[in-house]
Image: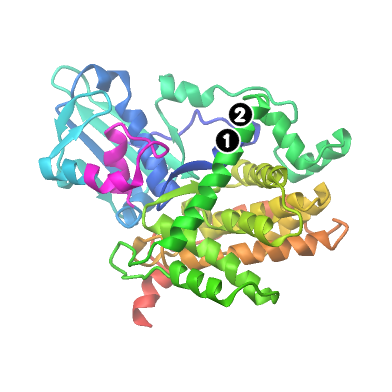
Amino acid sequence: MPAAAPGARPDPRLTPVSVRELFTIGIGPSSSHTVGPMRAAFRYAGLPALRARAPRTLVCELFGSLALTGKGHATDVAVLLGLSGWEPERVDPDAVPGLVEAIRARGELPLRGGQTIAFREAEHLLLHRGEFLPGHPNALRFTAQFDDAPPLVHHYYSVGGGAIVGDDAGTADAAADADRPRLPYPFSSGAELLAIGRDSGLPVAALMRANERAWRPDVDTDAFLDAVRAAMFACIERGCRVDGVLPGGLRVRRRARALHDDLVSRGRRSDPSHIFEWVSLYALAVNEENAAGGRVVTAPTNGASGVLPAVLKYYETFTEAPTLPGSRDFLLTAAAIGLLYKKRASLSAAEMGCQGEVGVACSMAAAGLVAALGGSNAQIENAAEIGMEHNLGLTCDPVGGLVQIPCIERNTMGAVKAINAAYLALRSDGRHVVSLDSVIETMRQTGEDMRPKYKETSLGGLAVNVVEC
């Protein structure tokens, strides 16, 4: 059956993007492999044809990166949960094992519409390893067979950061995604962002806030930002408290709790290494939680979910005069930079490699920290550029298809690099040779040139060489 390409997909540079699309509260371990497929399955199960009658069979097929690393990234679990009516924002991570075990033990799947159908993964959840569809490296195909109606076939593409594109245009869920307002300060490049800032006299955070006002009142935006901040810090706290071995078979031990206890026992010190150890701990704690399927903030992806919380925690813990408005400006500014990558390149490691995840998160966090510390728009753009420039070419080669090695430590490096980038920018006047737009375009070209085995397939790099070491 030929794949349906996402032909009706609007030009991303012209599509308004909200801060809510850069930060979502969901579950690990992957935004593109867990969150996106769960949303796709949820949407498909909500189609009117499925809500009206129970199908005789329902088959989900996974292609490309979703098939190659789907088991390690919990894509199989995500599909079962989504078809059952769960969304990543609403499902309790602690309840997931029980929900999935019940489906597997009974051989029955309770669909979102209320019907229960027979479902055996060996027959109804198929992984086509090595087969890619033309729409995107992360593709799903759902097919429902009925006794009294034609088959219902839909394709979905998980395009990064938990976002999905499907061929179900006209449905209620798809229409909700397409209902976007006209923004007062639209921008799709760093140059446009700087120009608008010069003309209006507004900092990046204020421009982003004004655009968010087209979606909702300021009070609701602040409530969302505060919820994101709280979820980030709660994830750090949980990660510092929990011990044990991460799931998946690599027997990777959690390290955050032991490091936390050691740092606490040593007391507060002024040397920079002590601060960097705390920053690394914050990122380590978040990404161990993510690897365990815990509650994390997609920022802008799950694989890179530790960078922004670590740098935000650094701002609130180690800078001289942190404020709640400063933290909100951090998140708004980071989102403004993130949407540039979303519009002009991609947040998908299956397209860009890890430069599109940890690299983008580093760029966003560097910009956010400069904003929180009172830097200018030019310094914000400079920090974002530095943060990405030194992550260009970063591959995605997860060992065992798990979001653990090198993903967890890579977030610690991204967080420390973001702080360095921020202070380099703050100590300059914002003038620099390489623009943010140039580095984003370089990332896009590098991602296109990167061989597929280095883009979230576990077919190259550490994923194939670590066992020989």
Q: Which mark is residue 220?
A: 2
Residue at position x 14%, y 27% from top? 56
Q: Is residue 292 magenta?
A: no
Q: Is residue 288 above or below residue 230?
A: below
**Residue 376, position in %: x, y?**
83, 49
Pointer 2 with pointer 1, Cβ within 8 A: yes
Q: Is residue 224 left or right of residue 396?
A: right
Q: Amino acid at mark 1?
A: Phe
Q: Is residue 393 left or right of residue 369?
A: left
Element under label 1?
Answer: helix
Q: Is residue 415 above or below residue 197?
A: below
**In terms of image quadrants, where is residue 238?**
bottom left
Q: 19 or 462: nearer the eye?
A: 19
- Residue under pointer 1: 224
Q: 345 or 117: nearer the eye?
A: 117
Q: Which mark is residue 155?
A: none
Q: Amino acid at mark 2?
A: Asp
